[in-house]
Image (spheres, rainbow, N blue to C red):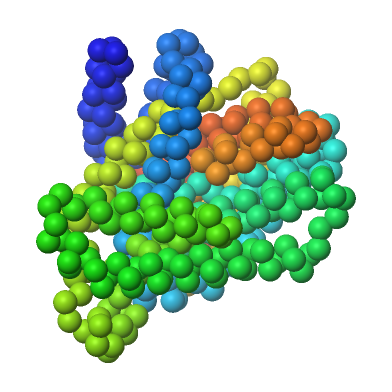
């Protein structure tokens, strides 16, 4: 027990150093934390993912909720209005292109049938909120570009989940209705956003009273867990609800709510001290999440490694074209576009969904799981390497040529 406590303390102190290193050298702390997990787990065998039991996935989900909520508090409604159309088109285009690349590679290199290959494609088509949101903050991207990246990661998580559920329905019953699928996606997004907004309005009305009680600094995060859990229980996207809750608590003034009597007085928004506390919570949970992800990685031969490299190489190349085509205008600097083309890592949603086909007896499910785990690692490595390399003048010149000045 003493060794475990000592290790936890050492990792937290190390993560502070890694965050500083990221700011100084552009070496992403998420990559080094994941590398530490790989060292402790698959390489040295000191820790195994099963050692965490049920608490491991639970704390990983808690980390995702807090990261999404804190990310929502940093978004401005005025910027979101101007970015929402761009975000929707860009997220959908990147999602579809990535899915098609992975499906083709899965069928050709992994010898998967169409349905399992499609599941693999949908699982890996999104970007990871847990990776993207902290990196957007650390990289200090432009406001609109950062908003597009954050919203893309949240939207594609929903598309991944709904898409996999639809494909499992096809596996079980042999068909799925396109209209019903589209309805599920829209309802998951719209109703989750409504729940998040209503939850935010309710919390604004009682936040001032809650502050009168002792030890309530974490009460807003606890409330975010309630909103997330309730939304998931109702069958909608808890991730969208958590982010929308954060947006509402920060932007209630821009939403015109102060014109209504209940919100015209005695409404306390989040203070800077609150936000500093949330950032600290994100830091601690992010540290745990990426070390846990590294520990949980599984290796079964070199084929998944080669396939993962091919899939992600094509994905990042296609993202350069999509970024140049769809992220144009004065709101996106050359640096913003370059970083946007690099931010395509996979993470928690993919890792969780990878185990689902195995539970339903899908042919090739073990291949889907092993390939997904490897792609998560490879995609984060590529993303981190590109971000680091961008500080070099020849790399900046290359991206300037590919993306347009």
The residue sitting at 24% across, 37% down in the picture is: 20
Quadrant of residue 198 within the rendered picture = bottom left
Place of residue 52 in the rendered image (x, y in percent of width and height, measured from the top left): 44, 24
Place of residue 109 in the rendered image (x, y in percent of width and height, measured from the top left): 79, 32
Going by the image, does 37 lie left or right of 348?
A: left
Can you see residue 294?
no
The answer to whether 17 is drawn above or below residue 74 in the figure is above
Quadrant assignment for the N terminus: top left
The answer to whether 255 is drawn above or below residue 34 in the figure is below
The residue sitting at 40% across, 28% down in the picture is: 291
The residue sitting at 24% across, 50% down in the picture is: 218
Place of residue 59 in the rendered image (x, y in percent of width and height, measured from the top left): 41, 37
Place of residue 125 in the rendered image (x, y in percent of width and height, measured from the top left): 63, 49
Can you see residue 65?
yes
Q: Please name whichever residue, 239 or 83, is drawn nearer the observer in this view of the structure.
A: 239
Quadrant of residue 24 within the rendered picture = top left
Going by the image, does 90 lie left or right of 371?
A: left
**Residue at the right extreme, as displayed:** 174
The answer to whether 301 is drawn above or below residue 58 in the figure is above
The residue sitting at 44% across, 76% down in the picture is: 82
The answer to whether 389 is drawn above or below residue 69 in the figure is above
């Amino acid at each position: 027990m003493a060794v475990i406590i000592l290790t936890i303390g050492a990792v937290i102190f190390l993560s502070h150093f890694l965050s500083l290193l990221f700011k100084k050298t552009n070496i992403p702390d998420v990559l080094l934390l994941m590398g530490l997990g790989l060292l402790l787990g698959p390489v040295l065998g000191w820790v195994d993912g099963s050692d965490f039991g049920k608490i491991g996935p639970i704390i990983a989900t808690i980390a995702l909720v807090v990261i999404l909520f804190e990310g929502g508090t940093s978004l401005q409604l005025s910027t979101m209005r101007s970015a929402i159309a761009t975000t929707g088109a860009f997220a959908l285009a990147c999602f579809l292109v990535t899915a098609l690349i992975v499906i083709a590679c899965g069928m050709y290199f992994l010898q998967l049938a169409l349905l399992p290959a499609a599941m693999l494609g949908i699982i890996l088509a999104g970007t990871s909120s847990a990776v993207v949101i902290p990196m957007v903050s650390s990289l200090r991207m432009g406001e609109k570009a950062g908003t597009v990246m954050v919203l893309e990661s949240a939207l594609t998580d929903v598309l991944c989940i709904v898409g996999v559920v639809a494909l499992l329905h096809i596996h079980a019953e042999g068909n799925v209705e396109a209209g019903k699928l589209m309805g599920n996606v829209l309802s998951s997004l719209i109703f989750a956003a409504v729940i998040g907004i209503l939850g935010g309005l309710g919390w604004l009305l009682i936040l001032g009273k809650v502050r009168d009680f002792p030890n309530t600094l974490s009460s807003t995060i606890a409330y975010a867990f309630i909103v997330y859990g309730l939304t998931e229980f109702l069958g909608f996207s808890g991730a969208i609800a958590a982010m929308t809750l954060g947006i509402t608590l920060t932007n209630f003034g821009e939403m015109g709510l102060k014109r209504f009597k209940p919100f015209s007085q005695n409404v306390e928004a989040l203070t800077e001290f609150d936000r500093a506390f949330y950032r600290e919570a994100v830091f601690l949970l992010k540290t745990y999440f990426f070390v846990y992800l590294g520990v949980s990685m599984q290796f079964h031969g070199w084929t998944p490694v080669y396939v993962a490299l091919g899939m992600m190489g094509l994905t990042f190349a296609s993202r350069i074209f999509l970024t140049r085509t769809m992220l144009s205008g004065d709101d996106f600097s050359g640096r913003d576009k370059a970083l946007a083309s690099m931010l395509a890592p996979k993470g928690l949603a993919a890792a969780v969904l990878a185990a689902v086909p195995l539970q339903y007896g899908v042919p090739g499910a073990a291949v889907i799981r092993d390939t997904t785990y490897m792609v998560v690692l490879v995609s984060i490595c590529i993303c981190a390497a590109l971000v680091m390399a961008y500080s070099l003048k020849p790399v900046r010149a290359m991206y300037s040529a590919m993306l347009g000045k």
